[in-house]
Image (cartoon, grey):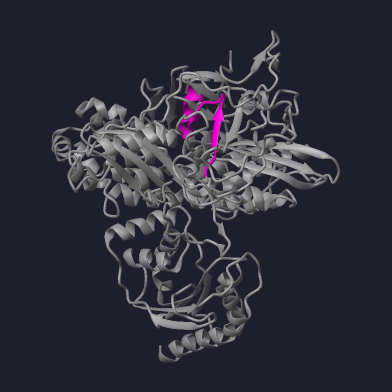
Amino acid sequence: MARSLTLVGALGYRNLRDHSVAFEVLERLSKADLGPDVVLEDVSYNPIAVVQWLQAQPPDQQFQRVIVVSSIERAGRAPGAVSTYEWDRVVPSDALVQQAVTEAVTGIISLDNTLVIAGYFGVLPASVTIVEIEPLEHEFGDQLSAEVARAMASVVTLVRDMVHERSLGA
Amino acid sequence: MCFKNLPVEFDERGQPFLRGGIPDPYTASTAPANVPLQLSHEQVEELVRRNGHVKSVDFDPVTRVAGALAFHAVADLKEGRVLEARSVATLFRGYEVIMVGRDPRDAIFITSRACGVCGGVHSTCSALAIEMAIDCVPPPLGILIRNLALSLEFLYDHPLHLHLLAGPDYSAAIVEPTNPALFARAKKTEAPHAEVHGYRTIAALMEDLNPLSGKLYVEALHMTRLAREAYVLICGKYPHPQTIVPGGMSSTITLTVMNEMFVRLSQFFDYSKKIASIWDDLTEFFYEANPRYKDVGRRRANMIDTGIFDHPDAYDASYKNADAWGNRRWATPGAIVDGELRTTDLHTINMGLEEFVEHSYYDEWTGEGQRQRFPTDPAGKPLSPYHPWNKITKPRPEGQNWKEKYTWDTAPRWDRLGMEAGCYSRLWSTAVAQKLPKNPFIEATGHSLKVRVPKGALPEMDLEWHVPTVWNAFERNRARAHCVAFTSMVAMNNWMAAMDRLKNGDTRTSVPYEIPKTGERLGVGFWGAGRGYLTHHLVLDRGAVSNYQIVTPSTWNASPTDRWGQPGPYEEAVMNTPLLEETLGTEEFRGIDVLRAIRSFDPCMPCTTHIHSDAGVITREVNTCACGVDG
């Protein structure tokens, strides 16, 4: 029977307070028994390289589902707020994709850029779930704010449940 | 005489000394002679007021460059010429401030973050500065692997710039709407090097330069992957390696690693033949179609480069012997003024360096009551109070207007001249100086650089880059394309030398070291980025950093007008650029000639300026030029 692989990717910035929360989530998930069909990966690098990594997966190791955990500022959310949604697969105009590629190859790492570029190059599976955490602290350092630290446990549970649901349904 | 503007002369033994009888020898009144000047802002305002066809043309942000750059120009749209040009770095780079008080080893990892493309060049430059300050010499294999790593970083950078950032300016998607007659001509023009790159006409070539869909664009993305993979094999990760240390490299290098790396490197052999022939054909096509394209991005051939890729038999990390080891590098250091190579000595290049802040968001650090910390370098040669070892970074973002301050970049000058940096400066000084180590692949003729590229799917080929007679946007891109071949063969030479060492059982890539906790020590990393010149000047005080100053290629290129009215290189290049776009005066006008001029420098603003505000670290920025609020 073909495997149904799930990628849980962490996207953020190391040692940048709340922007590092995705790595903490990944660390905790690595200690949970998620089974052999779940791959935990830091995807916080050049989105073009992320695309090339996904393209390089052998046919029997392609991901059927991707879950991306990231802290990102969105208007109107309280610090520590958690939002989950299915990515709408909308790719912007060619001019904006081109700008996204420029930013990607010159060092900008961001959730939106990664989704736009991976979407444009068609390397994402049908199911892409985003888990966002609203950050409060943006300074250098390894301490999460109290708000984001409090949210982390629920994010870990949320992602574990998502993965579990998937494996039950598969 | 090496210096024409600085008060430094040389005795009969070649030793420099300060010209006598001048009470304040580096005074601001010593203006450079015979340099272009900006119009005063009052003159420009008057022209705008009197002439309806003289208008502001602003690019904010300049897209398809690394980081945050804005550009303000005032153009005569009737005459098709630029009257005023101002380059604006819109973000602050705080590394000089961040580094003070830290352990110098932190600099290797912190300053790497100056760039998301070429972090390793900063790590290495930092390691070199530390090695000089603490007297630490890497073993030969460590030096060779370092050279390989940096070659690979450039093989990431050059295709990226040529076909992802600058290339679209010459694509069908841009040329057809901006210059339809030119594109019609391209359809009928056969490409001279069709047998190498595979495009029968220039228009076909332009079609594949189209962003996203063009084969050359997509191929460049693939080449960046090869370079990155090869780099990661020896450096562990990209773009911020953890394996570069004072005294060499901390990675373990084996024959297997070397062979895996070679598989990737060898794929640049054919690519370098192709990319050089593409840019040769494009350049000649534009020149033949309209010789005025030779004026796009034109400026004096004033260039500076500190050289790169050390010879393991020569490099001893000392300042004292920097002239000797610098002159044995695979890329020769050089200061070139009006096309003439003035010096290849690192001491002289260092002595001529000054940084000014009249139009930058910083306070002066010289002046009454200020003691010049280092009147001379460690070899006893005179230094300006404006030299980086004497500089203090004092940010002050006030007086934001074109008359006063308009950028976070400073104005570095050499012999008080606006110099530009690029991988082409590296080619130029190496070609003219003829100091290359003997090798089977690269020959400097005094007027050109011949590169013999081995057989791949294409046959072995001799490429030749000629020192150009005119210096402009097209020649920058052409030289950058030839730099792919040059860099590949520098890598080949170092790969072969490293293999010889490994086969003989010499596997040592680093030496132990300690950071002395006493005394004051100076170091400087003379190195290069993909875009050319790079220096990190370091002062250690009892083992901690008391001053750290970075000058990058884009610090030079994006620099503002200086205290004497001399424009920075982007500014000068844009001021000389004719507006040849056929849509001039219509709503479709894009300013493509100005953009070609700016992008030909391969701007890298993250290296120039950075990223901290009171609200925290800026991870992503939509920029707006503060100079819109003119005073």
Residue at image position (46%, 43%) is B155
Q: x and y percent of residue B363 in the render?
A: 61, 43
Task: Tell me which residue sits at (55%, 23%) in the image.
Answer: B436
> For the magenta stretch, what is the residue range?
B409-431
Give the x, y percent position of residue B456. Answer: 39, 38
Residue A160 in picture, x, y percent from top left: 52, 86
**Of residues B156 and B320, the one drawn nearer to the viewer in this rendering:** B320
| Figure quadrant of residue B272 | top left
**Can the viewer see residue A84?**
yes
In the displayed image of the protein, which residue is found farthest to the right? B518
Residue B584 figure quarter: top left
Judging depth in this view, the residue of B612 and B522 nearest the camera is B612
Query: From this viewpoint, is residue B481 visible?
Result: no
Q: Is residue B411 magenta?
A: yes
Query: Residue sitting at 51 percent across and 28 percent down?
Result: B564
What number of labels is visible?
0
Please state the horizontal and vertical placement of residue B162, each as a whole percent of the image. Answer: 37, 42
Left or right, B235 with reference to B210: right
| Image quarter in which the N terminus of chain B is found | top right
Q: In this view, does A75 lie to the left or right of B474?
A: right
Q: Nearer the viewer, residue B542 or B562?
A: B562
Establish if B264 lies above or below B528: below
Magenta stretch encompasses residue B553: no
| Position above or below: A128 against B587 | below
